Image (cartoon, rainbow, N blue to C red):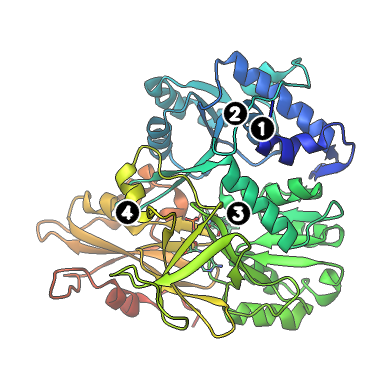
Amino acid sequence: MANPLYDTLFGAHEGQDTPFLYLQDGTCLTHAMFLQMAARYAHAFADLGARAGDRLAVQVEKSPEALAVYAACVQSGIIFLPLNTAYTADEVQYFVENSGARILICDAANKDALSTVAMAADAALETLNGDGSGSLSQKAQGKPGQFDTVSRGEDDLAAFLYTSGTTGRSKGAMLTQTNLLSNARVLAEYWRFTDRDVLLHALPIFHTHGLFVATNITLIAGGAMIFLPRFDLDRILAEMPRATAMMGVPTFYTRLLDDPRFTRDLTAHMRLFVSGSAPLLAETHVRFHERTGHRILERYGMTETNMNTSNPYDGERRAGTVGFALPGVELKITDPESGETLPDGEIGQIEVRGDNVFAGYWQMPEKTREELREDGFFITGDLGRIDAQGYVHIVGRNKDLIISGGYNIYPKEIELVLDDQPGVLESAVIGVPHPDFGETVVGVLVPDGVSTPDVPAINAAVAESLARFKHPRKLVILQELPRNAMGKVQKNQLRAQFGDLFQPD
Ligand code: MCA
Ligand code: AMP
């Protein structure tokens, strides 16, 4: 029986008493211990009636147990669907319904809020808390530490990751075993990961970066992770001496640079710092090099494609670029209107093709056709160019997207909520520069002329339905929105007008 993803990432380490997760309480989980934990969860899922191809949605704090749920899904052939812990019950409801999840796992603190969601979707609801306790662990307790791995093929689906869209409706990106495996193999080799690596892991594990990039690479190399529940500056500084590598979003690196304890000495032994998920300012790259002597390695990816490009490990890591297409990934710059390939140097939309590119959006064939061409090229929605030395530069986005601290925020989703509020005729949501998060959200409201928008009440309404990281950090009132001759809102003008709201004086 074969299950390539399980066999390669996890099965290869069965029985190995080598360190896998260094935890905050000073203990260490070996690969073997972790796999036994995963096998017990796999038995629990089988007892709950979940079978290969079923979806399992999970919204829990980062913990070794949460990671073992991922491993258990892969071993059982269950499609893993991780959700941001910041999502509200309204948001979770959509994901559970849309995916048809058979099981929903949440923190006990959210059980009441999510029980109606689970019931309406006919999903089993189990709890798993940040300390590993909960009904799921109770069900797993006493089960065998081995589980018969369910046979799966390379084209079978391994995970759904939801990504918002310009229409405001999230789409489930279907990722196959091959998508995940090919990328993990390529990256581990490209970045020279080995079983001697200890990765400082402070990213969340519900997105591509922390889960598939950081974790899968460590697993494929047989290395270990210092597994921090979240980004905590003091802990990162304290743990760095025993790490060899770190991965983060640009906010991690600007926060480290803002701390005088982050020095050349502290990082002298480090092998690699990787940045991604949002643009790393060239200035941050340069400051980091001046302070530590290390050049951050910037790479570029997407939920739908895993990683597409990377700066080189040995060659020049060029500030402000995302490097070269990874082995096995084709990348071209095309004319957004005609789809024709543009000559190197010209700016156009970035398209990618390879084993890394997803299988399509769950039950959204039209959306899939719009973005995934028949010949396999995926239209990323990013604008870029390739310079004379072959480095890819991302120069903008052809999609209305804000990236705040590495989280993607689609303005449409917020505009739909703002437009519904009393006193609001219409709204426009924009991203403006922010010193900590890179970009942050500003909402522009146009009054309906009947009543005045009540800003605190609107903020409360937004909080009710949308995750905290999506909330506008500022709501401003304008009598009308700037529009072009076609009636399209000119967000560039709004960004110019409100662009310095969060700039330090
Ligand atoms: C937290 N808050 C945020 C964010 N994070 N608001 C906007 N944007 C955010 N990213 C809220 C908190 O709820 C809090 O709300 C307030 O902002 C300040 O929180 P703070 O304590 O400063 O934040 P934090 O808890 O330290 O988190 C910041 C963070 C975190 C460490 C940058 O957001 C993070 O870990 N980001 C990584 C995201 C990530 O993994 N992205 C990868 C996506 P209040 O005001 O109520 O206190 S995968 C991807 O993009 C592709 C595939 C790729 O290429 O990797
Ligand atoms: P997500 O939908 O969370 O997968 O985010 C993918 C988007 O993040 C891409 O389409 C890019 O716009 C952005 N992104 C990821 N890495 C980088 C990077 N190194 N530089 C600029 N943008 C990036």
Closer to the camera, 142 or 347?
347
| Residue at (50% x, 45% y) in the render | 86
Which label is found at residue 209?
Answer: 3
| Residue at (45% x, 50% y) in the render | 468
Foreground mark, 4 or 3, reads 4
Which label is found at residue 77?
Answer: 2
Mark 4 Cα shell of 10 Å, populated few (<14), some (14-19), many (≥20): few
Foreground mark, 1 or 3, reads 1
Q: Which residue is mark 4?
A: 370
Q: Left or right: 262 with respect to 356?
A: right
Q: Quadrant of the N terminus?
A: top right
Closer to the camera, 399 or 430?
399
Q: Left or right: 55 with respect to 27?
A: left
Question: In whole angstroms, how far apart are the C-alphas of marks 4 and 1?
Answer: 32 Å
Q: Which residue is mark 1?
A: 3
* Sequence-first tag of 1 and 2: 1
Residue 71 x, y percent position in the rendering:
67, 34
Q: Secondary structure at mark 4?
A: helix
In the displayed structure, 180 sits above or below 349; it is above
Q: Secondary structure at mark 3?
A: helix
Question: In whole angstroms, how far apart are the C-alphas of marks 2 and 3?
Answer: 22 Å
| Residue at (48% x, 23% y) in the render | 102
Question: In whole angstroms, how far apart are the C-alphas of marks 1 and 3?
Answer: 23 Å
